[in-house]
Amino acid sequence: MDGLLWQPSEEVIAAANMTKFRTQVARDWQVSLKDSTELWQWSVNESEKFWLSLWRFCEVIGDGPGHVVLADGDKMPGARFFPEAKINIAENILRFSKPGDDQDAIVFWGEDKVKRRLSHGDVHDKVAALAAHFRGMGLKAGDRIAGFVPNMPESFIAAMAAASIGCVWSSCSPDFGVQGVLDRFGQIEPRVLITADGYWYNGKSHDSLGRAAEFLAKLPSVEEVLVIPYISENPDVSKVPNGRNINDVIAANAGADLRFTRVDFNHPLYIMFSSGTTGVPKCIVHGQGGTLLQHLKEHRLHSDVKPGDRVFYFTTCGWMMWNWLISGLGSGATLLLYDGSPFAPDGNILFDYAQAEKCTFFGTSAKYIDACAKAGIDPIRTHDLASMRTIASTGSPLAPESFDYVYEHIKKDVCLSSISGGTDIVSCFMLGNPTGAVWRGEIQMRGLGMKVEVWDENGKPVKGEKGELVCAAPFPCMPVGFWNDEGGKRYKAAYFERYPNIWHHGDYVELTEHDGIVVYGRSDAVLNPGGVRIGTAEIYRQVEQLPEILESIVIGQDWQSDVRVVLFVRLRPGVKLTEELKKKISNQIRANTTPRHVPAKIIAVTDIPRTKSGKIVELAVRDVVHGRAVKNQEALANPEALALYANIAELKS
C-alpha cells in the first residue's frame, strides 16, 4: 500500500477550488493553513466557522444563513444546522438554467438505443411546467412523489419539480420486483408516481407498465401516474390507472413561471431506503439544506467541479449516487446521464460516451473497474480521454490492483478518487482531494467538516490499525430522521446505540500514515455484492415463500476483491436441492427484488444456528465460512450447528 501513484502539478493545485477555499478561510478567519490536511483539521475544530465559510464560498441562494450556524451542537441526534435559514435546493441546482440558454445541461445515452440532449433553457421550461402541474393538482410541501424510473432526463426534471414546491422525492430503479416496490413506496404513500414505459438492458427492452399496474393496485395513495416515453414513442398510458403521458402534461403547462418555495433547512427532500436487514427497508429522510451544502462541498472542493465541466456517474435511480450526481448541475456542470448495462453492446460504451462528450469527471463502481480489468479493456490505447481529470470509484473498496489498472490501462494523469459514504448520509465520509497525492489502495482524505475517526474496540481513536468508522461530531447531512419513526427510536438505534452521541457507521477501516483511509468492508451483516447494499431480510422474505424451504440464512462471502451472496437453505424432509430447485429459488428472488439479490451459491444445510431468543446469526455463519473464530458461542441455542458451515468445498470455487 506504499505506492505513490499520482501527484497533482503545482498548476493544478493553484487552480483548484480546494485551494481557493483554503485561501478564503485563511483570510476570513486569520488562520494559517498550508495544505488540505491542515484545512481538514481546522474544519472539524472550528465546525461552525467551516460550514458558514462553505455557505459563503458556494454563494448559497436563500434567506440566510442567519445568526445561528448550529443549535444543540452537543446532541447527536438532535443538532440542527442553520435553524433560521430558508432555502430551496432546486433554486440552487437550477441557478445556471436560464430561459433560452442553449448550452448543454443534460446529455443522455440509453445504451446505444437512445441519445438525447437538453439545454439549460429546456430544463428550466420543463421543470417550471411540471411544477405548475403539481401545484394545479393541489400538491403541497411535504407530499411525496415517487419515481419508478431509469436514470434519464425526465427523472431529474420530476425530482427538481417536486423539490421546487417542497415535495419529497423518492425513487427506485425499474428492475425492482413488485414486492420490492411495495416495501418501499407502500410506507411513504406517494400521491404521484412517475414511471417510464420500460427500459433497455443488454440491448433488450423490458416493459415497466405491467409491473407498475401490479403494484399500483396495492398503492391506493397514488392519484396520478405520469408515463415517460422511453422504449416507445407513444406508450399506452391506459395500462396504468390514471395514467398520462408526461410530455402531454409538460406541453399543457408550457410557459409557466419557474417558482421556488423556500423551506426550512431541514425540510424533507428525499426519502432513501435502507437495505432492509431486519424487515422492510427503513425510510431515511434527508433534508434540503444538508443535502445541498454537502453536495456543493463534495462537488466543488473534493471533486473540483467547475462551470463547464461534464460530470458522469454510472448509477441507477435506486442508488444514492444518482441523488449525488444530479446536484452537479448546481456547480455549473453538464450532467452526463446513462441508463442500461455498462457493457452493452460491448465493454467500451462508457468510455465511448466519455470520449464523445469530453467527460471531465468519470464516476463508476469498484466492481466495474475490476470487470474492465478482467475483460482486458484498454482505454488508454483505444480512447481519447484527454478531458478526464478525475475518476471516482465507490460501492465497495477499490482493490490496490484496480488502482494499478486505472493508471496502466485507463489514464496516467488523473486523480483517482475512491469515495465512501452511503445512503445514510446521501454523501461521503471520505473521498477525493484534487490537491493531494493518490496512494495505492487508499481513499485520499476525510471529508471537510466531518470529524471522521477510527475507533478500536474500547472506543479510542487509533491510527495505523483497523477499527470502526465513526463521526464524532454533528454534520448537516445527518438524516432528518426515519419516516414514521415515533420518538426517533429506530433512527437512534441505527447509528447512535453503540457509542452514545457518536455516529457509528458500521464500516471496518484504517486511517493511514498519509491521513488516507483503507476500507476493509462492512462490519455488520449487510450484503454488498458489486457495492450494492442488500438486506438479508429482503432475500428471506422471498425464499421462505417457497414450499420446499423451511428456513434460510444468507451471508456475503469475500470473493475476488468483491462480495458474493451465498444462500444456505434448510429443506423440508424428502426434498433434494436439485438444479431445478436452485433455479426456482433464483427466479423467485429475481422476480421480486433485483438481479443483484440472486445468490452466487445456494447450499443445503440441516440446521441453522440461532440465539436463545430464536434469532438466526448471520455474522457467526459468515465468520465460520471465512475461517474466523466465533465469539460468544454461549449465546447460541445450538452452537453445534456452526460446524456445518466450515470448510465447504463448494465455497472454494
Image (tube, rainbow, N blue to C red):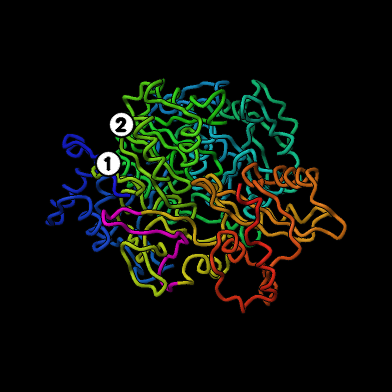
Most foreground residue, 199 or 593: 593
For residue 65, the mark is none
Query: Which quadrant of the structure image shows residue 619?
Result: bottom right
Which x, y percent locates residue 191? Answer: 63, 46
Q: CA distance from mark 1 to mark 2?
A: 15 Å
Task: Say whether residue 569 is left or right of residue 409.
Answer: right
Give yes or no for residue 351 being in the magenta stretch: no
- What's the residue at 71%, 34% (across, down)? 209
Q: Which residue is mark 2?
A: 412
Most foreground residue, 65 or 208: 208
Q: Residue furthest right?
A: 574
Q: Residue furthest bottom?
A: 634
Query: Which quadrant of the structure image shows residue 4?
Result: top left
Q: Secondary structure at mark 1?
A: loop
- What's the residue at 71%, 65% (across, down)? 608
For residue 434, the mark is 1
With respect to residue 219, does 503 lie above or below? Answer: below
Magenta residues?
499-517
Which x, y percent locates residue 621? Answer: 62, 63
Q: Secondary structure at mark 2?
A: loop
Which of labels 1 and 2 is toward the front? 2
- What's the residue at 60%, 59% (across, down)? 625
Residue type at mark 2 is Lys
